[in-house]
Image (tube, grey):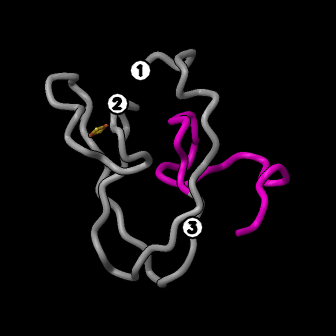
């Protein structure tokens, strides 16, 4: 994936997830419902990453696709305003 595209300027998404539910994180950057997969990857050669969390609660998911710990954001969180 091209890391210099417009997605590299996107902020992470703070989202409430349910424990033990399967989610699909978009790895291609084409989804219109970031950070989740909407099927737009078809034909790109990139597939979504299935994941779940052990506890219900808020998580910070990567949107820029540059994280070293997918699907979670691994950036400096100091610029994020709590909601
Ligand atoms: S739309 Fe990006 S992986 Fe499915």
Mark 3 closeness class: few <14, some 14–19, many ≥20 residues within 10 Å = some
Q: Residue furthest left?
A: 43
Q: Which residues are magenta?
A: 61-83
Mark 1 falls on what kind of element?
Answer: loop
Image quadrant occupied by the C terminus: bottom right
Tell me if residue 81 is in the magenta stretch. Answer: yes
In this figure, which residue is indicated by the disc labeled 1?
Answer: 1
Q: Residue furthest right?
A: 78
Ligand 1 image-quadrant field? top left
Tell me if residue 75 is in the magenta stretch. Answer: yes
Left or right placement of residue 4 versus residue 52 in this view: right
Nearest-to-viewer mark from 1 and 2: 2
Q: Residue at x 57, y 54 (%)?
A: 13
Mark 2 falls on what kind of element?
Answer: loop
Q: Residue at x 42, y 45 (%)?
A: 34
Asked if the residue at label 1 sits under 8 Å from ligand 1, the reply is no
In this figure, which residue is indicated by the disc labeled 2?
Answer: 30
Tell me, yes or no, whether the two marked residues, 1 and 2, touch with CB atoms within 8 Å: no
Q: Residue at x 52, y 17 (%)?
A: 5
Image quadrant occupied by the N terminus: top left
For residue 53, above or below residue 19 = above
Please identify the dominant SS of the magenta region. loop
């Amino acid at each position: 994936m091209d890391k210099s595209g417009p997605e590299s300027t996107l902020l992470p998404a703070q989202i409430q997830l349910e424990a033990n539910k399967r989610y699909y994180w978009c790895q291609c950057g084409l989804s219109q419902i970031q950070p989740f997969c909407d099927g737009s990857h078809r034909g790109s050669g990139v597939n979504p990453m299935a994941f779940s969390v052990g506890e219900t609660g808020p998580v910070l998911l990567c949107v820029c696709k540059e994280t070293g710990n997918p699907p979670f954001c691994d950036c400096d969180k100091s610029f994020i305003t709590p909601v």
